[in-house]
Image (cartoon, grey):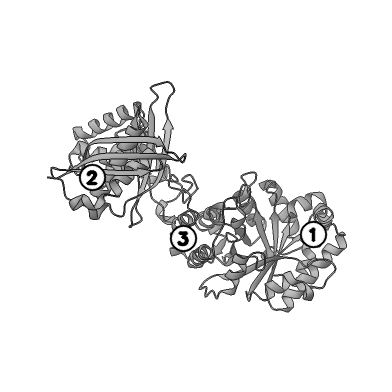
């Protein structure tokens, strides 16, 4: 049986740019577009030429995409002028893209309130705009804004809007749930009705996530007839976001109800790039990835409960709906106070520690983890600190840099600035080294004291030069004058490897110091630095 083709339309560069706190540079847009082209999506909506300098410059550049079709975005012509004399449409024609997507109203309420024109004028704007781009031999798409709300309010008029574009030769009619309030059963019913007027092979879905149903609505729309699916990387978008292509693409490819009936243009080998694509966007946005994202999140295949881990070791299918490697992700066995022996053994194997199952050191490590978590440690988010603990108990971690003493002070100077200073006494190969530094906080000052004197750390200087602290988090675990503080530090280096360390103490500086030392030790260990004499 031949499969029907589904087309993936990415709107990250436009819808994603409307997200609060997101401001793509031209370089950002080019990196994202390149990643999407390499992934193999069918359409990349690059933005709205003429709307802002960045989008205009993006479309002025030449993009030699191998797999994707660059699409520009705009709106239907304004009332009172012809399509040929509309400056907004002229900017789209001059963008030299093979495809154009125009948004237009399909809800009579919006035509009246937002546009302030008659329903007939709106229909004319749609049809004349469609005719203009079809005549220019562009692949024309009409985004029927607020279609589902419009259909529920006045189905006859909503259908007349999409017919106005379709009858003039539109390749795609995209049904938009712009407010994101439509539910899957409504989408199924409405799309089935629309398919009687416009063939499913010409229909698309553009779902927003305001009820948390954007992915479900997109899947429902496909099963009811649509063949183009719009969305963004990681569901990026205004308000609650858009349909997440990082969930939709692997579902189409890996789930039998879809893969048996449909095919997508993305090659099987490229499905494994989804996790990297997801994390590239977060890297560009300089934000911490959502570890709970389906398929691509760091916790998507994490197992914590002892019974779960025991079953996963026998067969991963017991608690995993797909193989994590299929989407470029990895399995993660979490170690915590809920851990059993299975968790410990599995985690040790993952960090390449071979040990017999009946070795008494396993029980010693399990007891140590539980004792430490009782006083506030949490190793399910601090893999580097757990690995150091495990290797120290097994006896595989050499002694590197000893920090015998440190002194941290915070003062307010005459100009009103708060200045933190730190002084630490380090020891390498029996030699004592005094390091001093300042920072915008005590931990930053302590970090700078070591970092600014890294050239004095003899044989360890070359290993620590590229060490950077990425994130620093503090959590107060209880209340009172002796509150326990947990500090988590995320570190990275020039190889792009990130690791997490933890420290716990009744003193925030001491907790920070412990996490910082673990970060240094882990960096030295993973780079095979020699032991201190």
User: Between residues 533 and 224, which one lies in front from this camera angle?
Assistant: 533
Looking at the image, is mark 1 or mark 2 earlier in the sequence? 1
Q: Write down the quadrant of residue 484 in the picture.
A: top left
How far, Cα to Cα, is label 3 from label 2?
Answer: 31 Å
Q: Residue 271 carries which label?
A: 3
In the current view of this chain or complex, which residue is farthest to the front? 414
Q: Residues within 10 Å of mark 2 (few under 14, many from 20)?
A: some
Location of mark 2 (residue): 353
Measuring from the top left, give residue 414's x and y in whole percent.
Answer: 44, 39
- Residue at the extreme top of the image, as rendered: 480
Q: How far apart are marks 1 and 3 (CA)?
A: 36 Å
Nearer to the camera, 267 or 428: 428
Residue in the picture at 65% in, 53% down: 207
Residue that mark 1 sits on:
159
Q: In the image, is residue 2 above or below residue 294?
A: below
Q: Residue at x 30, y 50 (%)?
A: 452
- Badge 3 crowding class, 10 Å Cα cut-off, few under 14, some 14 to 19, many 20 or more, is many
The residue lying at 67 percent from left, 68 percent from top is: 50
Q: Estimate the x, y position of residue 388 in percent, counting from the top left.
A: 26, 41
Task: Give the left or right position of residue 136, taking residue 24 as reference.
Answer: right
């Amino acid at each position: 049986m031949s499969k029907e083709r589904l087309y993936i339309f990415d709107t990250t560069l436009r819808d994603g740019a409307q997200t609060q706190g997101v401001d793509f540079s031209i370089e950002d847009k080019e990196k994202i577009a390149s990643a999407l082209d390499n992934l193999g999506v069918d359409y990349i909506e690059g933005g709205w030429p003429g709307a802002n300098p960045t989008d205009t410059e993006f479309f002025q550049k030449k993009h030699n995409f191998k797999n994707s079709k660059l699409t520009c975005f705009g709106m239907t012509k304004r009332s009172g002028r012809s399509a040929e004399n509309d400056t907004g449409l002229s900017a789209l024609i001059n963008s030299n893209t093979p495809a154009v997507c125009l948004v237009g109203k399909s809800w009579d309420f919006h035509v009246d309130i937002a546009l302030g024109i008659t329903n007939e004028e709106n229909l004319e704007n749609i049809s004349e705009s469609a005719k203009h781009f079809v005549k220019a031999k562009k692949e024309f798409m009409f985004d029927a804004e607020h279609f589902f709300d419009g259909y529920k309010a006045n189905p006859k008029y909503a259908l007349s809007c999409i017919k106005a574009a379709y009858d003039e030769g539109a390749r795609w009619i995209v049904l938009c749930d712009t407010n994101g309030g439509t539910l899957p059963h409504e989408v199924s019913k409405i799309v089935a009705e629309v398919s009687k007027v416009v063939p499913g092979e010409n229909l698309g879905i553009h779902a927003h996530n305001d009820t948390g149903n954007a992915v479900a609505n997109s899947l429902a729309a496909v099963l009811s007839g649509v063949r183009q699916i719009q969305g963004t990387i990681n569901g990026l978008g205004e308000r609650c976001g858009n349909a997440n292509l990082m969930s939709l693409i692997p579902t189409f490819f890996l789930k039998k109800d879809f893969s048996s009936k449909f095919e997508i243009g993305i090659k099987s080998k490229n499905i494994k790039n989804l996790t990297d694509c997801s994390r590239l966007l977060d890297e560009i946005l300089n934000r911490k990835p959502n570890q709970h994202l389906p398929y691509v999140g760091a916790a998507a295949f994490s197992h914590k409960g002892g019974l779960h881990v025991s079953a996963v070791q026998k067969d991963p299918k017991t608690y995993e709906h797909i193989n994590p490697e299929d989407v470029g992700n990895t399995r993660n066995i979490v170690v915590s106070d809920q851990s059993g022996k299975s968790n410990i053994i599995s985690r040790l194997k993952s960090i390449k520690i071979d040990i017999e199952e009946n070795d008494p050191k396993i029980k010693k490590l399990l007891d140590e983890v539980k004792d430490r978590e009782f006083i506030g440690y949490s190793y399910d988010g601090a893999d580097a600190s757990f690995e150091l603990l495990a290797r120290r108990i097994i006896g595989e971690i050499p002694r590197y840099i000893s920090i015998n003493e440190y002194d941290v002070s915070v003062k307010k100077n005459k100009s009103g600035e708060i200045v933190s200073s730190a002084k630490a006494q380090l020891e390498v190969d029996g030699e004592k080294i005094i390091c001093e530094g300042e920072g915008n906080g005590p931990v930053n000052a302590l970090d700078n004291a070591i970092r600014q004197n890294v050239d004095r750390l003899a044989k360890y200087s070359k290993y620590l030069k590229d060490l950077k602290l990425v994130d620093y988090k503090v959590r107060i675990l209880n209340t009172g004058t002796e509150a326990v503080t947990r500090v988590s530090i995320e570190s990275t280096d020039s190889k792009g490897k990130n690791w997490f360390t933890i420290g716990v103490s009744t003193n925030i500086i001491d907790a920070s110091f412990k996490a910082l030392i673990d970060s240094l030790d882990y960096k030295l260990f993973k780079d095979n630095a020699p032991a201190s004499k």
